[in-house]
Amino acid sequence: MNELATLAKEVLGAFFVGGLLLGFISQRTHFCTMGAISDVVNLGDWTRARQWACAVGVAMVGFAALCDLGWLDPSKTLYASDRLMWLSTLVGGVMFGYGMVIASGCGNKALVRVGGGNLKSLVVLVVMGVSAFATLKGITAVLRVSTVDTVFVSIPSGANLNILGVPGLGYVVGAALLLWALCHKDFWTLDSLLAGLGVGGLVVAMWWVSGHLGFVPEHPQTLDAVYLGTSSGRIEALNFVAPVAYTLDWLMFYSDTTKVLSTGIVSVAGVIIGSAISAVQTQTFRWEGFADPRDLGQHLIGSVLMGVGGVTAMGCTIGQGLSGMSTLSLNAVLALAGIVLGAVVSLRHQIVRLERSAACA
């Protein structure tokens, strides 16, 4: 049992370091899915979109390699399912995408901003976490389970792109994304390469830690196979909606011995600390609050949409957009499509609102 406890600490420590590096890289390079979509819509700039594509490409190739080496069982990941939850992922994705724009960033970006001294993002995280927990186990969970979750398509062979029957599809799609990102000479900057290769590499590393390092074929008490440190009992990588909810739960009920640290909780802490280290080092740390009640209200609405939408879609821009996509999950594809759609609609709405305000001035 002592060896098991030590191994669990190693898994948690690795996820904390992974979160720390993600926070540092995101703060230093401005890696952000919402920012990437905003740059394309508002400026026609695809640089950060290529960072994201590079990260997904690395994650896909790495995940496929881990599976082929026998270090990972793809059927045991958090995103493996024989149900295509098309309505949940689309509706949840649109809600999350719309919400992250008016809340100034997704879950990961909010954590990064908190590390940089942004108090608005602290409020966003708390409200998003409460909303997410309610959608996991509370009032909105009842609504979710009785409505959108009842609509799905059963795919016995697994709801992932491998149903297309293309050998080595993860390598093919991943290489195509990498080629698209790297073939543009403007992408060859330290920040872009660090963001794309670094974030993608971290996702692969966390898959290995959770699915290989933390795998115990036979737990001495239950005799069942277990993946140490995960809240779901399955192989997990990086995700920042449910983990924020579980972080609040752990903090509020710390004295309850049934509340234990998980990979998600320590990665949340890691991102904040990593971002803070980078912000202090680059002298960009500064306190920031809400400009006015309208600004507060907008962020509160966005936070709720992200919390409810993120759980409904079974992940966020990092959870489904990177970790889920690396497994070729069809649910992740639909969730990402919903997130992009919701973000574009929200950005367009903001542009129209600003134009009207300028016309009235």
Image: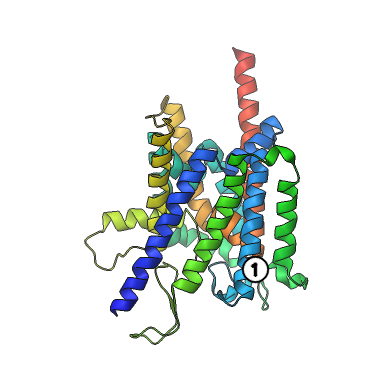
Q: Quadrant of residue 17?
A: bottom left
Q: Quadrant of residue 162?
A: bottom right
| Quarter placement of the C terminus | top right
Q: Quadrant of residue 348?
A: top right
**Which residue of the protein is positioned furthest toward the bottom in this rendering?**
223
The residue depicted at 61 percent of the width and 37 percent of the height is 346
User: In this image, 113 relative to 74: left or right?
Assistant: left
Q: Is residue 249 above or below residue 23?
A: below
Q: Is residue 313 visible?
A: no
User: In this image, 287 relative to 152: left or right?
Assistant: left
The picture places residue 81, in percent across and down from the top left corner, at 60, 72
The residue depicted at 36 percent of the width and 55 percent of the height is 247
Circle 1 sits in a helix, a strand or a loop, which is it? Answer: helix
The picture places residue 292, in percent across and down from the top left corner, at 42, 24
The total number of labels drawn is 1
The residue depicted at 77 percent of the width and 70 percent of the height is 164
Report which residue position mark 1 lands on. Answer: 64
User: In this image, 105 relative to 219: left or right?
Assistant: right
Q: Nearer the viewer, residue 62 or 271?
A: 62
Q: Is residue 18 visible?
A: yes
